[in-house]
Amino acid sequence: MTFASARFRKAPAILALGAVAAVAFVLSVGMGAVALSPLAVLRSLAGLILGREAGPEQIIVGLRLTRALLAAAVGASLASSGAVLQGLFRNPLADPFVIGSSSGASLGAVLAMTLGLGSGAFGFTAIGGAAFLGGLGASVLVYAMAGSSRIRSDAASLLLAGSVLSSLLSACVSMLLAIKDKDLHQVWFWLLGGFSGRGLPQLAAAAPAMIVGFLAAVGSGRVLDVLSAGDDEAASLGLSPVKARLVVGAFAALSVSAAVSVAGSIGFVGLVSPHIARRFVGPSHGALIPASALVGAAMLTLADTAARSFFAPIEMPVGALTAFIGAPFFLYKLARRGLEATR
């Protein structure tokens, strides 16, 4: 079966996941202090598209629409990057933060907060811009550290370098918090992730990098399928595992850095979504990556809806809710791998 035919065969499952993501999106736009029925949401969305005169319902939908779009885009970026990295490292417990992007982005954002930077450009706030640059910079350092080792950028050295650098950057964040404790509330809310105060400018600023990262992820499906057979097998087919990890990982880092720069550090979406998608479409990355993106979009959209609706008037950090789902799942997968290793 060819790469294209495998994706076509899984089209019904991908369409079903797309329908789930669409339902989650409509529910997200409809829920809030003023609840709207799904029919009212669809009617208002049609009015916005056709440019009809805005009524009360249409105004409410317009206010919630950008946040829902941002949550879906971030969820899709984290999930598709998670599917890429799990294939790239041949490790089902890998997620987008394994390459250091999250820790680097967190350090950049916290540094901007402690310095009191407030201006921005091109839709990025100073905090978002610093987070984006920090995430990319950390990923470059991970690859430089792994490339200087004798193993030469294989999966093990990249995972080890990412873990070491993440620990170091987290220590730097802790030191900054100790020095500038007056910003503690703002910093912790950002580190836990969320979409409060984010809007169209942030979405427009991050969208190009997230779109490029997603397209690169979809285009790397065949490469990831080859790498899943092992480095020796990939080399025998004319593929350089080192170059493949460098190029594919760089695009994943771009997408993750953009997502973290606008939403903060939201964990476990990139870990859990590919496992759910794999149940529907199997291991072939040509279908797995778009399916993971749809699962991630639905998951984060629903998590954001719960964060701002279920605890009103308090808005909970979205990352705290995803951790309640992701942490037990991570422990389950870890325990399952341990049991399988002892058999």
Image (cartoon, grey):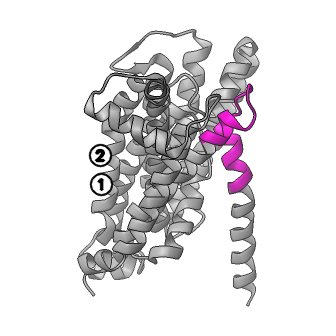
Q: Is residue 313 magenta?
A: yes
Hey, which quadrant is residue 109 in on the image? Answer: top right
**In this rendering, is residue 228 above or below 323?**
below
Q: Which quadrant of the rendered structure holds the C terminus?
A: bottom right
Q: Is residue 238 magenta?
A: no
Q: Which residues lie in the magenta part?
A: 304-325
The image shows residue 293 at horizontal and vertical percentages of 44, 56
Q: Which residue is mark 2?
A: 212
Q: Are marks 2 and 1 in contact (CB under 8 Å)?
A: yes
Q: Residues within 10 Å of mark 1 (few under 14, many from 20)?
A: many
Q: Is residue 257 visible?
A: no
**In this rendering, is residue 172 above or below 291?**
above
Query: In this orientation, which residue lies closer to the viewer: 149 or 64?
Result: 64
Magenta stretch, main secondary structure, is: helix
Question: Helix, strand, or loop for circle 2?
Answer: helix
Residue located 38% across and 74% down the image:
12
Hey, which quadrant is residue 316 in on the image? Answer: top right
301 lies left or right of 289: right
40 lies left or right of 5: right
Q: Amino acid at mark 1?
A: Ala
Question: Helix, strand, or loop for circle 1?
Answer: helix
Residue located 50% across and 68% down the image:
277
Residue located 28% across and 76% down the image:
8
Q: Whole-Å distance between the Cαs marked 2 and 1?
A: 6 Å
Residue located 34% across and 48% down the image:
213
Q: Which mark is residue 216?
A: 1
